[in-house]
Image (cartoon, coloured by chain):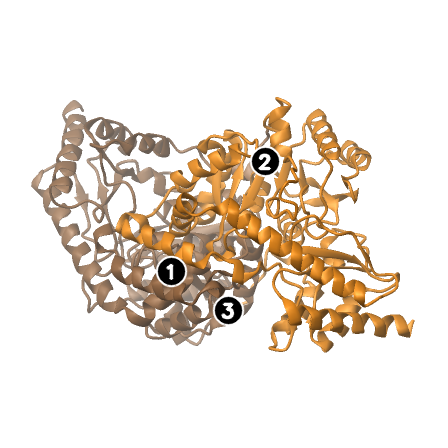
Chain colours: A orange, B brown
């Protein structure tokens, strides 16, 4: 049989980076590429006990469930979100297979192929894949250390009239940046005046190294301003509990959530009922907020460790801004250094990372790289950074 | 914010039936509407023990997994499929969130909006939703008690050149029909000569009341004929283990599976890693085939029970063909009786079912109904059938 594939799936760029990273499965390879949380911090025992309580409920726990998701978990999440200044009812919330599915469903219900979407520059790799699959034109507003540059966003919105704005205002992936409250307010005002909804993706918001720092979400600011309804928010338990449980959620106006549920019914009927019940039981008995503080403190240490190791290599032209949360260091490499070429050389030496080009919809800044510091620790991180620095030196020595 | 929704999601018919069925949540309501398997037959203890073994593995079991799915489970499934005459390698298989997701992904990678898809008449309700969401024109070939009518299928394929054929040859939903081997061969030959791939959906194939009956899948027949590659097959553990585990799979040529994996990566990165590992542990230790025999025997009994109860009501003009497997009775109601009107009256009396019209892409046969007999038992089934018969009698007395 001669298969012809749809334009949406062939439109997905066959990624050079993905092909190289496939070579990084070897035993001696140290990978800073993945976005993997630290396994040793998963609350294994608590999850196990929660699962046991779910199975004690017997067969009904294993039956088909609601497309919208397990109601007690939605109720718990509504309460949890309330503590962060986001007030929603269960019918304004949909449980999803990680926040990736929430992004995919929102795009399905709010855009047509050929529509335009505004993102930050650079932005999350896997959301770009969703936009490609859905035939969207991506336009990217400049961002700096305070967040998206409002003037640039407004100019692009005025010129291109996007259907949706995608934003990761707190510890963005790949940059780790936090938007200032002022920038948040500016974007909200612009989007509100042009009638463009915002998809706020917040997988890392709780992983803040300074426990006392407060970063209000766009969703909360929108509600505070009484403008409620222009932000659809998504987050996940993948970084705060464990990704294998694949439990994320979306919040927004009930009419948007109802449409997403319709699309989800066609997509997979519902996400794992077992996983949702495990998370629900866990929230009932496990001090998740204390656990998140432990994770955040540990990630802060790992970030400083990697930062120290990189600084210790004294590589001229290597720059970064210290992140205040999240799981990544975003590096600017010495000028003229192409990170994709560097990746090839690095893999030879036994270390992997993601070249920054993957995070740009177009016009990539080629001398950038994303390094994950949460998965590896100690000697492994040290050896990985050494190999990485060695690879850079070979390039800079050559030029 | 004034939301405008995409044409694909607004194209989903707002279902009258769904609206009525929402009223069926009451305590006294007896529902034959859902496609729910019998909870009391879920292997709860075995699943619990399997889960416990998964959690014993510790944190790595809860990390991000492969988009293609947990490799050991794919290997086990390949072996299992081999015993049914379907020979595939792990790279020819993708694990999904139930078979619903497999259907959705196959449609995404093989069709464009505006393309045509051929189905049986009638066919599975939730696949029609996927086709609508994806902007497909649905054409429906007649089918009789031997399966799809090959001449009608060929005529439609010649005239409309569909991109894909969707078929449920064994215990189709809603009809419970089994295609004869001859009809299977005929469709395979037609599709092969016109170059149209077939999506074979087989969620019920193992639930056969006669344990010795053998119904070769289209996938197996295609391989036997050495024509390998024109069938993409999907099935699920939802009916043989438990639906809450949301574990299904698709099999097909490696290039198709690779494209589906690309689409799945954008859709949700991967399905629940925990669920896949639980199923894998279960397959290692639990006699699943023996368990399927128990389920099948019990469902056969329930089918005969409901059949006897319906026959005992002596309703003139009520007809059905005794199914050989699956979970549903497909009824032809007295002529002129509109099943949607009957549903309204039935719900008043405290019993629900799905009107047949929901299973037709167009030109529904309105005097048809699907009754599930696996979820309720004993006195409840008897009372439900009584209420159902009463509602019918009111209509037929009136006319």
> SS for tag 1?
strand
Of badges 2 and 1, the one in the foreground is: 2
Crowding at dot 2, Cα within 10 Å, few <14 / some 14-19 / many 20+, comes out as many
Write down the residue under mark 1.
B235
Whether marks 2 and 1 lie on the same chain: no
Which residue is painted at 29% across and 39% down in the image?
A: B354
Which residue is painted at 38% across and 67% down in the image?
A: B280
Of residues B274 and B352, which is closer to you in this image?
B274
Please tell me the numbered disc located at residue A232: 2
> SS for tag 3?
loop
Mark 2 → mark 1, Cα distance in angstroms: 34 Å
Write down the residue under mark 3.
B253
Q: List x then y, in percent, for residue B385.
A: 15, 38
Residue B137 visible in the displayed image = no
Whether marks 3 and 1 lie on the same chain: yes
Q: Is residue B18 left or right of residue B350?
A: right
């Amino acid at each position: 049989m001669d298969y012809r594939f749809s334009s949406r799936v062939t439109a997905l760029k066959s990624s050079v980076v993905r092909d190289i990273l496939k070579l990084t499965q070897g035993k001696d390879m140290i990978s800073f590429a993945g976005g993997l949380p630290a396994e040793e911090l998963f609350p294994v025992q608590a999850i196990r006990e929660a699962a046991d309580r779910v199975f004690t409920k017997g067969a009904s726990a294993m039956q088909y469930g609601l497309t919208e998701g397990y109601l007690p978990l939605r109720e718990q999440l509504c309460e949890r979100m309330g503590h962060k200044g986001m007030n929603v009812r269960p019918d304004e919330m949909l449980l999803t297979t990680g926040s990736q599915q929430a992004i995919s469903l929102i795009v399905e219900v709010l855009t047509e192929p050929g529509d335009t979407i505004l993102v930050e520059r650079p932005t999350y790799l896997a959301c770009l894949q969703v936009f490609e699959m859905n035939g969207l034109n991506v336009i990217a507003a400049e961002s700096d250390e305070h967040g998206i540059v409002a003037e640039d966003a407004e100019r692009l919105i005025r010129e291109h009239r996007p259907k949706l704005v995608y934003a990761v205002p707190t510890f963005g992936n790949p940059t780790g940046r936090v938007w200032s409250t002022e920038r948040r307010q500016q974007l909200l005002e612009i989007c509100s005046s042009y009638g463009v909804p915002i998809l706020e993706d917040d997988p890392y918001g709780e992983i803040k190294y300074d426990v006392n720092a407060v970063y209000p979400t766009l969703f909360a600011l929108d509600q505070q301003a009484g403008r409620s309804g222009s932000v659809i928010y998504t987050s996940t338990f993948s970084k705060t509990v464990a990704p294998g449980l694949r439990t994320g959620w979306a919040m927004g106006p009930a009419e948007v959530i109802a449409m997403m549920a319709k699309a989800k019914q066609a997509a997979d009927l519902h996400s794992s009922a077992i996983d949702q019940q495990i998370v629900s039981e866990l929230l009932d008995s496990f001090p998740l907020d204390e656990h998140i503080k432990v994770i955040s403190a540990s990630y802060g240490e790992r970030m400083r460790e990697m930062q120290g190791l990189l600084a210790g290599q004294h590589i001229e032209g290597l720059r970064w801004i210290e992140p205040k949360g999240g799981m990544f260091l975003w590096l600017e490499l010495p000028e003229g250094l192409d990170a994709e070429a560097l990746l090839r050389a690095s893999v030879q030496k036994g270390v992997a990372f993601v070249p920054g080009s993957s995070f740009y919809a177009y016009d990539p800044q080629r001398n950038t790289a994303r390094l994950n510091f949460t998965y590896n620790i100690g000697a492994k991180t040290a050896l990985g950074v050494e190999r990485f620095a060695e690879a850079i030196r070979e390039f800079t020595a050559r030029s």
